[in-house]
Amino acid sequence: MKDVYQIILQPLITEKSTILRESNKYAFVVDRNATKPQIRRAAEELFDIEGDILKIRTMRVRGKPKGKMLRYQRGRKPHWKKAIITLREGATIQAFDTI
């Protein structure tokens, strides 16, 4: 089994994710092969939110094309996976309070 730091790679800080935070939804970049149960266990262990997770939604995001030409082939940024974790009412992730 992977380490929690290998499953949840980084928080996703965008304008849309900060708006979602008002409705107790937090966005993360996760490992492309991580499953929802693995993401749940990693989030509960990493952020100490045992039993506060209501729902986890995941989506695969295609990498955007790079602007430079590499020997007549366009390059791409790597594909990645996003997870949106919904917490119960009143629960928060303390690490996001300072952002």
Image: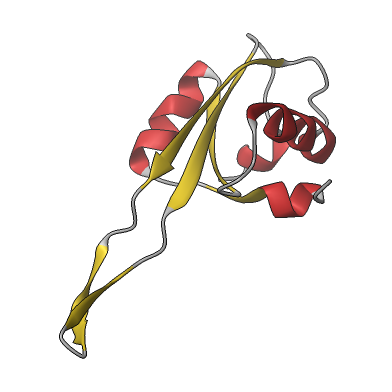
> For the point 67% across and 25% down, which residue is it?
92
Front-most of 73 and 8?
73
Position above or below: 49 against 7: above
Q: Residue 75: give x, y in percent of width and height.
A: 27, 75
Q: Residue 22: give x, y in percent of width and height.
A: 48, 22
> For the point 61% across and 49% down, which residue is it?
31
Front-most of 70 and 57?
70
Judged from this view, the residue extending furthest toward the top is 89
Horizontal placement of 93 versus 48: left or right?
left
What is the quadrant of the C terminus in the image? top right
> For the point 63% across and 8% down, which residue is it?
89
Q: Residue 58: give x, y in percent of width and height.
A: 50, 31
Horizontal placement of 19 versus 99: left or right?
left
Q: In which quadrant of the rendered view does residue 88 lie?
A: top right
Front-most of 33 and 64?
33
Position above or below: 41 against 29: above
